[in-house]
Amino acid sequence: MNSTYFLYTRRKRFVFFISLFGILLTGSQASAQLRDNLNLADHDSKFYHLGIALIYNNSHFQVSAHPQFLQSDSVLSVNPENTGGFGLAGMHTFKISPHFEFRVVFPELMFSYKNLTYNLKYPNGDQRALATKQVESILLGFPVQIKFLSDRINNFRVYMLGGVNYQYDLASNATARKAQDLVKLKSYDFSIEAGIGFQFFFPVFILSPELKISNGLINVHSRDPNLIYSNTIDRLNSRMIVFSLIFEG
């Protein structure tokens, strides 16, 4: 009786250990298979990685009228228009934690165009005309951003970002002398930014479509009371929507 019970107990233990070994082996194989299906599986362990961005921007001015606008007998209205531009940028990303990254964008070079349309009245008061002034900018930017990343789902992840951006306008016309038809701008701007992006992991790179909104905090208008297209404007604040395709390794 005792020997039969002993053999039965040993058999149960043997079956238990075989079953446990099978479960562990199956789990290990499943984990290895899942890892094999992940592209760039070791990417999240990197402290630093580099990227490049192709940029399209859509921008305009937020216009604030000067008190002299009410006294003007030639400019009836000033309306901003949305216009497109493009750019390139280098991305330098540093890992803070599994869900947070610090990103420095440099160099960022963007070509931006912002139009202002003036509704003008001629001195005789009978005729009106529209005049559009295109303000061109070549912006050298230095954005600094914090990214919050979701958990990775296979080869996909979503993230949100926020930060600030200092920009220097290489095409600033604030010091132009023969500028009767110009709207003068200061050479610098400072803005806050927020956006969302999606990471798609491919075998050799990561593609991240990203959408960002940028609001300028500084009045970039260099007002000249002697210029017809400038004296009726008090403040010009930049507004920009930026779409980027980011390639990272």
Image: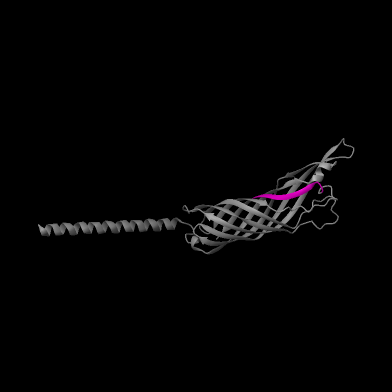
107, 18: nearer the viewer: 107
Q: Quadrant of the C terminus?
A: bottom right
Nearer-the-camera pick, 85 or 226: 226
Quadrant for residue 16, please give it: bottom left
- Is 205 in the magenta? no
Considering the image in quadrants, where does the N terminus appear? bottom left
Q: Position of residue 166 (x, y in %)?
A: 67, 58
Highlighted range, magenta: 231-241
The furthest residue to the left:
1
* Residue lying at the far front of the rendered structure: 67
Q: By what rule are the colours in the image chosen? A: one colour
- Which residue is found at the position 63% from the left and 55% from the top? 54
Is 164 displayed left or right of 138 in the figure? Answer: left
In the rendered view, tell whether residue 67 sits above or below residue 172. Answer: above
Percent x, y for residue 23?
Answer: 31, 56
| Furthest residue in direction right, as rendered | 124
Q: Is residue 210 visible?
A: no
Residue 244, percent from left and from top: 62, 53
Query: Hey, which residue is sitting farthest top in the picture?
Result: 126
Q: Is residue 238 magenta?
A: yes
Percent position of residue 172, x then y = 77, 57
